[in-house]
Image: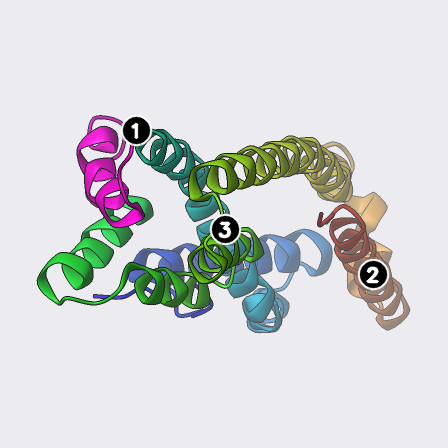
């Protein structure tokens, strides 16, 4: 069964995680800042506006997992081609090579099983199967590798040298991108800690001096100021996350 990685459909577990997170965030915000279950319900409903972004993040994580696994696959393909195998044979050997590292449910193992089935049982050309894989993945690095392989087939170039060179370049790019994303993940985590600071401060004030925040929850002006402040905090968090997204 082919996997379309640009598909943003969520699994049941991912849907439950989003709903649970929205309920916890919405009800916590409503009770802390408004002392109102109704406000908590409204904020929970507003969290649904984040669903498209959440789906995008899930899709990006799927692609990142596939990309890292594809980097490993490149090394096994390069090694097999250097030993005189064809790319179709290299794909078949890669299953045995990586089955001790990856599980059958991992993306790359599912793709190898699907591609090998089409090549060896369906009689399709390896280049057509690889093109389909690149199109379904929506990942530029996979498409680049397929383009290199196709160019070698069409021009009669040195396939071994071209694949080894492409493997080195693409592997280095993926590694660098992974390191940058690790650094950015740290910055995003720090920005989320900063965003949680107002919640901690309000909770501390409610515990130590409940009357101090009463004008913010009991008066219309206080609720307006609270809503405006929360809106600014949410906008700042979204901006920080967008700034921290770097693509190579």
* Inter-mark Cα distance, 2 to 3: 53 Å
Q: Which mark is residue 226?
A: 2
Indicate the secondary structure of the residue bearing disc 2.
Answer: helix
Circle 1 is placed at which residue position?
A: 83
Q: Position of residue 135 (x, y in %)?
A: 45, 68
**Image quarter of the N terminus:** bottom left
Residue extent of the magenta highlight: 83-106
Would you say residue 8 sits in the magenta stretch?
no
Q: Which mark is residue 128?
A: none
Would you say residue 89 sits in the magenta stretch?
yes
Indicate the secondary structure of the residue bearing disc 3.
Answer: helix
Indicate the secondary structure of the residue bearing disc 1.
Answer: loop
Q: Position of residue 102 (x, y in %)?
A: 26, 34
How many marks are shown on the rendered structure? 3
Circle 3 is placed at which residue position?
A: 145
* Residue at the limit of the structure toward the front, as seen here: 156
Q: Nearer the viewer, residue 129 or 15?
A: 129
Q: Position of residue 188 (x, y in %)?
A: 70, 40
* Inter-mark Cα distance, 2 to 1: 67 Å
Density class for disc 2 (Cα within 10 Å; few <14, some 14-19, many ≥20) is: some
Density class for disc 1 (Cα within 10 Å; few <14, some 14-19, many ≥20) is: few
């Amino acid at each position: 069964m082919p996997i379309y990685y640009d598909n943003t459909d969520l699994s049941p577990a991912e849907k439950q995680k989003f709903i649970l997170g929205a309920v916890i965030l919405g009800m916590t915000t409503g009770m802390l800042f408004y002392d109102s279950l109704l406000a908590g319900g409204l904020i929970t409903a507003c969290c649904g506006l984040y669903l498209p972004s959440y789906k995008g993040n899930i899709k990006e994580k799927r692609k990142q997992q596939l990309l890292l696994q594809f980097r490993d696959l490149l090394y096994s393909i390069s090694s097999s081609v250097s030993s005189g195998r064809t790319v179709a044979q290299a794909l078949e050997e890669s299953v045995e090579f990586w089955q001790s590292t990856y599980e059958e449910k991992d993306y790359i193992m599912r793709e190898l099983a699907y591609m090998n089935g089409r090549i060896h049982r369906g009689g399709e050309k390896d280049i057509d199967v690889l093109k389909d894989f690149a199109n379904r993945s929506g990942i530029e690095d996979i498409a680049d590798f397929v383009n290199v392989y196709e160019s070698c087939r069409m021009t009669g170039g040195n396939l071994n040298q071209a694949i080894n060179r492409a493997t080195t370049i693409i592997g280095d790019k993926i590694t660098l991108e992974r390191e940058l994303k690790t650094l950015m993940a740290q910055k995003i985590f720090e920005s989320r800690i900063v965003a949680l600071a107002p919640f901690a401060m309000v909770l501390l004030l409610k515990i130590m001096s409940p009357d101090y925040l009463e004008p913010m929850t009991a008066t219309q002006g206080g609720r307006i100021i609270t809503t405006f402040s929360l809106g600014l905090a949410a906008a700042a968090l979204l901006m920080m996350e967008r700034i921290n997204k770097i693509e190579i």
